[in-house]
Amino acid sequence: MILVTGGAGFIGANFALDWLSISDEPLLNLDKLTYAGNMENLASLTDDPRHHFVRGDICDRALVDSLLATHQPRAIIHFAAESHVDRSIHGPGEFLRSNVEGTFTLLEAARAYLAGLDAGARAAFRFHHVSTDEVYGSLAPDAAPFAEGHPYAPNSPYSASKAASDHLARAWHKTYGLPVTISHCSNNYGPFHFPEKLIPLVIVNALAGKALPIYGDGLQVRDWLYVGDHCAAIRRILADGKPGETYNIGGWNEMSNLEIVRQVCALLDTLRPRSDGQPYASQMAHVTDRPGHDRRYAIDARKMERELGWRPAETFASGIERTVRWYLAHEDWVKNVQSGAYQAWVTKHYGDKP
Ligand code: NAD
Ligand code: TYD
């Protein structure tokens, strides 16, 4: 089986659902269920015997040790992290704990676990560390996209904590021979995206008649990738990636925030027009910029194509339409997230720990 951390969050849940839709290999899902973890994302797996969910913290070494000893996974795919830049600005402490100390704990537990495996199992084992393009910092408008050798220059507490965890993962490979692979992906979007991030926030605020906040001039550029394509890329790395290698994953789709918001508004105008006939774009409102806001990210994903034959399957046009349609069809999911009902469920089932 494989061990996935953070598998109740946005990308981890998509990964778990995709994995079990195409493979019969069981998946052990370790997630603390922070505000970003939502068991509703995994509702379709409730009665699936191949999915083993454990609520727990990746910083809990005794728990991780016992999970590894009991379930003997052949790989760890490490998604669990605090992931929102704005939250990291307001409270960086939890980012250092989960992203740095949590990754350290997993690496150490994996190292001890591997020492007890036979040579064949040890050689087949993989620790895949899921990172972000944000560790590279901000690109000038005419600079080449981030390739794997690009120097690190993180600018937010979030990206600094992810950069730190990447360095640990790299060092555990170099020093201890842990079979680590690392991927740096651009901005994901798709189903189950928590509505604190730009695209889902714009969809849910638009439908609720609220303002669509544009930080600063809105001309910051991101590369956007449909979440299913990210999951497919990780599966390719797990299958054929080389230990010690880093892979950059992106959608070849650079867009400014203004363009993104306008496209989402235009889709909503078609799929769920406002009752007063006005365009949703009229709800756009420029607000104070984010401190330290990175101007541009872009990914050179040629290594993924050259070495692993991966390219995104979804275009932005097809992916964003799927996404908007998903949110329109899942208003209960949005309602439960906004009301906090999804967390009341966690307290009821697990109590207040951890
Ligand atoms: P998310 O915030 O939606 O989900 C994170 C999950 O991790 C949640 O389920 C949460 O409960 C869990 N978690 C947090 N701290 C934990 C801890 N200490 N122990 C156990 N579980 C814990 O994040 P996401 O957007 O799904 O991102 C997943 C990973 O992908 C992160 O490592 C992130 O840095 C990386 N990434 C995200 C993007 C993106 O666009 N969202 C892009 C590139 C890379
Ligand atoms: P976000 O989804 O938070 O992802 P990240 O900061 O990791 O790239 O933000 C994407 C871009 O959208 C980023 O440039 C910040 C901007 N943004 C807004 O303009 N308004 C918003 O309300 C949010 C959440 C983000």
Image (tube, rainbow, N blue to C red):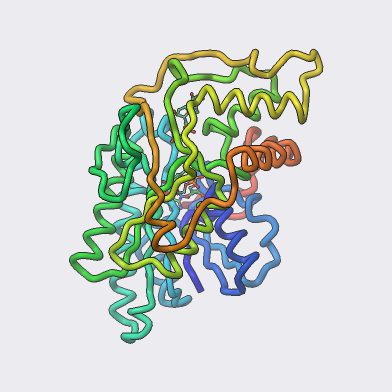
Between 64 and 160, the residue placed more toward the observer is: 160
Between 162 and 135, the residue placed more toward the observer is: 135
Q: Name above or below for residue 325 compared with residue 47.
A: above
Q: Position of residue 15 (x, y in %)?
A: 55, 57
Between 94 and 318, the residue placed more toward the observer is: 318
Left or right for 194, reference 291? right
Q: Is residue 145 visible?
A: yes
Q: Residue at x 46, y 37 (%)?
A: 223
Q: Residue at x 74, y 36 (%)?
A: 328
Q: Is residue 351 visible?
A: no
Q: Position of residue 289 (x, y in %)?
A: 41, 18
Q: Position of residue 78 (x, y in %)?
A: 42, 58
Q: Name above or below for residue 259 compared with residue 158.
A: above
Q: Name above or below for residue 64 compared with residue 8.
A: below
Q: Residue at x 55, y 68 (%)?
A: 27
Which image quadrant for residue 266? top right
Q: Position of residue 68 (x, y in %)?
A: 41, 72
Mark count: 0
The residue furthest right is 275
Left or right for 163, reference 270? left
Q: Residue at x 28, y 64 (%)?
A: 244
